[in-house]
Image (tube, grey):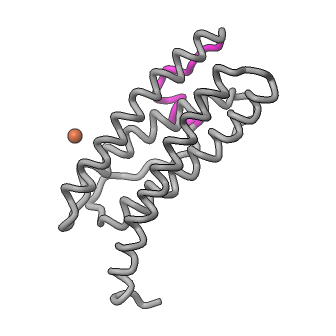
Amino acid sequence: MPAKINKLNIFLSNLAVLNIKVHNLHWNVIGPEFMQIHKMTEDIYKMLQVQFDTVAETMKMQGKMPMATTAEYVKNATIKEIKSRDFQVYEVLEELDNDCGIIMDLAKEIRDEADENDNFQIANLFEDYLDIYSKQAWMIKAMLQEDVEGIEDDSDE
Ligand SMILES: [Fe+2]
């Protein structure tokens, strides 16, 4: 993580990259649970788009300049992109689970630092995000558990 980049800009970059990545999963998931994952990822990308705008506008309110180019987002995001291909349901869930963890770790750092600096606007916003993402993580993990058990019969491990 580059030291000089404001963590809010890294969070913003993650939202931008994850928005595209979730579209990739939304379009390319295959299998009998297609519709469930297709709808779930749609809910997620709509949420990401709202958060993307809110984080940038909150930065502006606080006199900070939000990054606004895809080149900067790709350079600074800690979420890793994946090329489009067919994705099994468990692959989608594993990607979402991992990325949810990345988002939550950074959100916690931002919330804690904002708390220390009495920046209640950021602290409250990221407290809300932590609530939202912990619910998301719970749902993803619950779905993943069922799916991983289903495929273990065919695995070599
Ligand atoms: Fe869609």
133 relative to 88, above or below: above
Q: Nearer the viewer, residue 37 or 81?
A: 37
* Quadrant in the picture for residue 8: top right
110 relative to 58, above or below: below
Counting from the top left corner in percent of width and height, residue 102 is at 58, 49
Image quadrant in which the N terminus is located: top right
At 23% from the left and 56% from the top, the residue drawn is 36
Residue 17 shown left or right of residue 46 in the figure: right
At 69% from the left and 28% from the top, the residue drawn is 5
Q: Nearer the viewer, residue 85 or 126?
A: 126
Counting from the top left corner in percent of width and height, residue 93 is at 39, 60
Residue 72 shown left or right of residue 48 in the figure: right
112 relative to 36, above or below: above
33 relative to 157, above or below: above
Furthest residue in direction right, as rendered: 116
* Mark count: 0
Span colored in magenta: 64-76
Q: Quadrant of ligand 1?
A: top left
